[in-house]
Amino acid sequence: MKNLNEFHANKKKTMLVDGDLLAYKITSALEETIEWEDDVWTLHCDLDKCKQFWKQAIAYYMRLTNSAMCIIAFSDVSNYRKQLDLDYKSFRKGIRKPITYKPLRLWIEQTHKTLSYPFLEGDDTLGLLATGDYKDNCVIVSGDKDMRTIPAWHCFIIDDSIEFVDTQKADLNFCTQVLTGDKSDGYIGCKGVGAVKASRILDGKKNISLMWEAVLQEYQRNGYTIEDAYHQSRLARILREGEYDYKKQEPKLWSYKYEHYRHFEENREAS
């Protein structure tokens, strides 16, 4: 599927849906506050209505993307990134999920084809599917900008736009994330580097080798170590095929040319 015409003409592709985001969006939108007598307030949400909105949304995106089937990806209760860094999404601990989120997810799991891998976020599951079993024959339906680090066709819930992200663009987006960080996810990246500066740093870099070297050089210029850069990259990296051990049920952390650069830094410090 090299262009939109080929994308829409392919009626056999699989739609990979960000279940976390879509379920949250629906349940939060339908949640209502009710004021009773004597200053008593309660929250109310009709689960049947949530189910109806969910079915309508899935049917809508199936038509929009002209897909044959769909798989819903959800996050596991455990998250390996929180083991790597205690600050990762730590601010979300106090944020309440809509009251019908859990029962809606349970119903979705009972009535749809869903998938969740141990210790992974739903984004990782989407990334593994899109670059693995369903590579070149799928579309990811999500609203998370981080998903642009996955080479695949994307349909964005925010505006229903459809876009193809090739491997070079996906790698560029990933390296940009490592440089700029993501405050909403709780990792800082390389302090002082925003989107404009990151674009200049990565300008003209045509492959992941050149991009990653530029990332490491910028970290070093700002007083960071190679370890700092790899740590941030492991928080930013949405997994692709080959980066998760299905038998051991654990991720393979981003370690691109790690030994080379680690020894390079050790030799430089020794000199």
Image (spheres, helix red, strand yellow):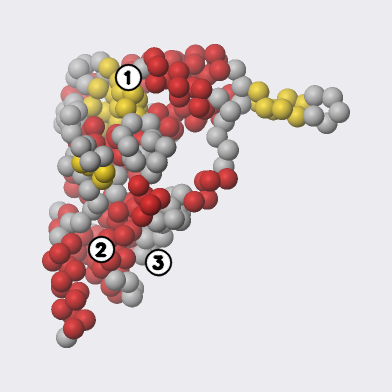
Which residue in the structure is indicated by mark 3? 191
Horizontal and vertical percent position of residue 243:
21, 44
Q: Nearer the viewer, mark 3 or mark 1?
A: 1
Residue 196 in percent (x, y) is at 36, 60
Callout 3, which amino acid? Answer: Lys
Which numbered disc, 2 or 1, marks the residue closer to the eye? 1
Residue at the (31%, 23%) spot, across then down: 71
Q: Are marks 2 and 1 in contact (CB under 8 Å)?
A: no
The residue beneath circle 2 is 215
Q: Are marks 3 and 1 in contact (CB under 8 Å)?
A: no
The answer for how far apart the CA atoms under marks 2 and 1 are is: 39 Å
Mark sitting on residue 209: none
Query: Does the CB distance between marks 3 and 2 fall below 8 Å?
Result: no
Q: Which element is circle 2 on? A: helix
Task: Inspect this view and state whether residue 171 appears.
Answer: yes
Which tag, 3 or 2, sits closer to the chain's start?
A: 3
Residue found 17% across the figure and 29% down from its top: 133
Sort mark 2 into few (<14), some (14-19) or many (20+) by Cα contacts within 10 Å: many
With respect to residue 57, does 217 lie above or below? Answer: below
The answer to whether 101 appears left or right of 253 in the picture is: right
Q: Secondary structure at mark 3?
A: loop
Mark 1 neighbour density, 10 Å: few (under 14) some (14–19) many (20 or more) = few
Q: Residue at x 29, y 49 (%)?
A: 237
Which quadrant: the C terminus?
Answer: bottom left
Residue type (three-letter) at the residue carrying disc 1: Lys
* 141 or 44, nearer to the observer: 44
Q: Earlier in the sequence, mark 3 or mark 1?
A: 1
Residue 72 percent location from the top left of the image = 35, 25
Q: Amino acid at mark 2?
A: Val
From the image, tell me which residue sits under label 1. Answer: 113
Q: Quarter-wise, where is residue 110 in the image?
A: top left
